[in-house]
Amino acid sequence: AVDHCVRRFLLITAKCPKRQVLSLGAGFDSLYFRLCADGALDGTAVFEVDFPDVLNFYSTITYLFSGPVYMCSSQYRLLGVDVREESQTEEALSAAGLDWAAPTLILSEVVLTYMETQRSDAVIGWAAKRLPQSLFVMYEQICPDDPFGRVMQDHFLKLNSTLHALQQYPDLSAQRQRFLDKGWERCVCVDMNAFYLGLVPQEERDRIETLEPFDEYEEWHQKCSHYFILTASRGALMEQALLSQASGSVRLYHTVTPLPRGGGVVVYGGRSSPLRPNSDLFKLTFDLSAAKAPRPEAEKVQVEPMDCTGNPPPPRFRHTATVVRHKGEPRPNQRHFLFVFGGKNQSACALGDSSFLSLDQQHWTEFPVGGDVPAARHSHSACSYLGSVVVFGGLSREGEPLGDLSLLTPTERGFDWIRVAVHPPPVPRSVVFL
């Protein structure tokens, strides 16, 4: 992902007479040598910065100059300096020939998160202030609070490499807002699943698939959901995106459910074809204050994938997804759940199962469901009513229109279905609105 961004930067700045790459915490990275071997560095100077103690490991080879500059050539500058010290860093970079006005790519590959968050925030703000024509690329971890995230944190803690930024910036939305707050004009942030599926060409993915047998997709997707690549930009380079936000897949017959307390909406399921139902979840949030401003921002809707734990229901379309309330455990106060009922998929003409997603914990939760359970159906309607759900109509497995009305109500331990008699009985129908 980082290599993609670097090569994209070199492509969009190919006509610039001078351009620079500033790598923070470069360590033993071979980026410069790989790019040099490919002949990709015409008109480019690469500045690699790390702690002097790190560079001293190979000082017998590289320490050719005095002061913080360990090596200096027309295309490559190696500096030993602590980037947390702004004045020292600026002085060292200026001495090494950095042009503060030239187009500059700043790289941070799992570097800033090892600093105290206040210090890393300062570095991000400093770069935005001092480099007005620049692009910032950062690769780090996210999602610290699920089981994978907790093990991930413990692993780095044992290595004496605490991931500081995770506590204040735990997800893509927080990281994006972090850069905007620190002076960057545009920011795109995607996890590695989205990067791989949205930005790696299909032919390259096909090539990777043929390298060797691979069957650990669950573990691979889990890890990729805990790492992200971010690009932020300033100045004329703001319009030259190194990353593009992966567009949501085309779908129909999905559900869009408003969340309580103005928390946005949840998009669930649907299909791209009758044989390809979806099971993914997205949360959409809206910046209403920006819409009311005298000059509203162009971007008012934010889309985030919801990474849920537990046992999800089968993929489906033509279902319903409605918010219900239940006291339950472990907390005595009422919690909100997304109740998914019915629908169909490539293997079932109609589904009759009930599934509950905790909106607080993003966890698929099992509840006992009793009472007069409605027949399996799809293309029906459902709406929230005083913490319960009203379900009406739809089509049965045989394609017969249904005209029954049922109420799902919370009980002490789960939920019960209650059949509601309506007089006169409504005309059986499907695709209705309540």
Image: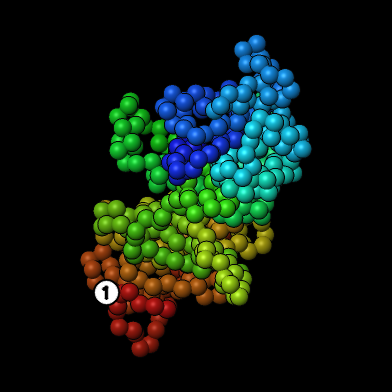
Residue 25, above or below 140: above
Q: In the orientation shown, which residue stands out farthest toward the top?
A: 60
Q: Residue at x 26, y 64 (%)?
A: 397
Q: Nearer the viewer, residue 314 or 58?
A: 58
Left or right, 115 with respect to 228, comes to right
Q: Residue at x 46, y 52 (%)?
A: 245
Can see residue 282? yes
| Image-quadrant location for residue 8 | top left
Q: Position of residue 241 (x, y in %)?
A: 48, 50
Colouring method of the image: rainbow
Can see residue 160? no
Q: Quadrant of the C terminus?
A: bottom left
Q: Position of residue 411 (x, y in %)?
A: 56, 65
Left or right, 81 with respect to 261, comes to right
Residue occupied by mark 1 = 401
Q: Residue at x 44, y 41 (%)?
A: 14
Q: Nearer the viewer, residue 143 or 431?
A: 143
Q: In the orientation shown, which residue stands out farthest toward the front?
A: 17
Q: Nearer the viewer, residue 232 or 362?
A: 232
Q: Position of residue 335 (x, y in %)?
A: 60, 62
Residue 142, above or below 56: below
Q: Residue at x 56, y 37 (%)?
A: 20
Residue 245, above or below 222: below
Left or right, 37 with respect to 140, comes to left
Q: Give the crowd class for mark 1: few <14, some 14-19, many >=20 residues within 10 Å.
A: many
Residue 357, above or below 318: above
| Image-quadrant location for residue 202 | top left
Q: Position of residue 122 (x, y in %)?
A: 72, 44
Helix, strand or loop at mark 1: loop
Left or right, 404 with respect to 291, comes to left
Q: Amino acid at mark 1?
A: Pro
For the image shown, how many numbered marks are present on the structure? 1
